[in-house]
Amino acid sequence: MRRPKPISPRIHGVLDYTTSAAVAVAPRAMNFPRPARLLFESLAAGYTGLSTTTDYPLSLKRLVPFKAHGATELAIAAVLPIMPYALGFADHRAARNLCFGLTALTLVVAALTDWDGVERGNAAMRG
């Protein structure tokens, strides 16, 4: 049997909510230009909405399968590095680097997350 990865669904949820809060606060704290502020505020709202509806321990309503949640995060990570250029804020170092940092964080967390943890937990509760 394969050993589970170190980030459980519960810890993944904690990371999601913490990241959402940081992404929501950063644009105003670091005086981001309007396009970057709108991107990060939208991203924070989207991540929070996804997190509250994901099938994992910290959600409010378990509608989105955990693996679909992960696929959504990876899709966002795929486009995030081009957003500073597409939205015209590539010259704002902090905003640009937050896009790159979030991409890196997402990829590392995805690689270390136990995506089967929810299914194992549900099976344990059933039987």
Image: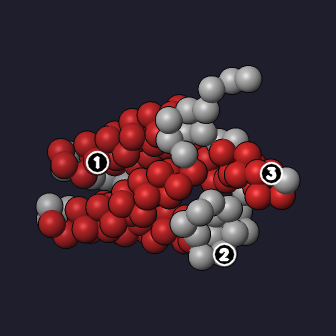
Q: Secondary structure at mark 2?
A: loop
Q: Secondary structure at mark 3?
A: helix
Q: Earlier in the sequence, mark 1 or mark 3?
A: 1
Point out the frontmost of discs 2 and 3.
3
Q: Is residue 57 above or below residue 107?
A: below
Quadrant assignment, res 44: bottom left
Give the farthest residue toward the right: 127
Marks 2 and 3, how far apart at CA: 19 Å
Say if mark 1 contacts mark 3, CB within 8 Å.
no
How would you rate the neighbour count of disc 3 (Cα within 10 Å): few for under 14, some for 14-19, many for 20 or more? few
In the shown orientation, is residue 75 left or right of residue 91? right
Give the farthest residue toward the top: 1
Q: Amino acid at mark 1?
A: Leu
- Image location of residue 115, percent across then percent down: 65, 42
In the picture of the structure, the residue carrying the numbered disc 1 is: 98
- Which labelled disc corresponds to residue 40? none
How would you rate the neighbour count of disc 1 (Cα within 10 Å): few for under 14, some for 14-19, many for 20 or more? some
The residue at 18%/45% (across/down) is 93
Point out the frontmost of discs 2 and 1.
2
- Which labelled disc corresponds to residue 123? 3
Say if mark 2 contacts mark 1, CB within 8 Å.
no
Q: Secondary structure at mark 1?
A: helix
The residue at 73%/46% (across/down) is 120
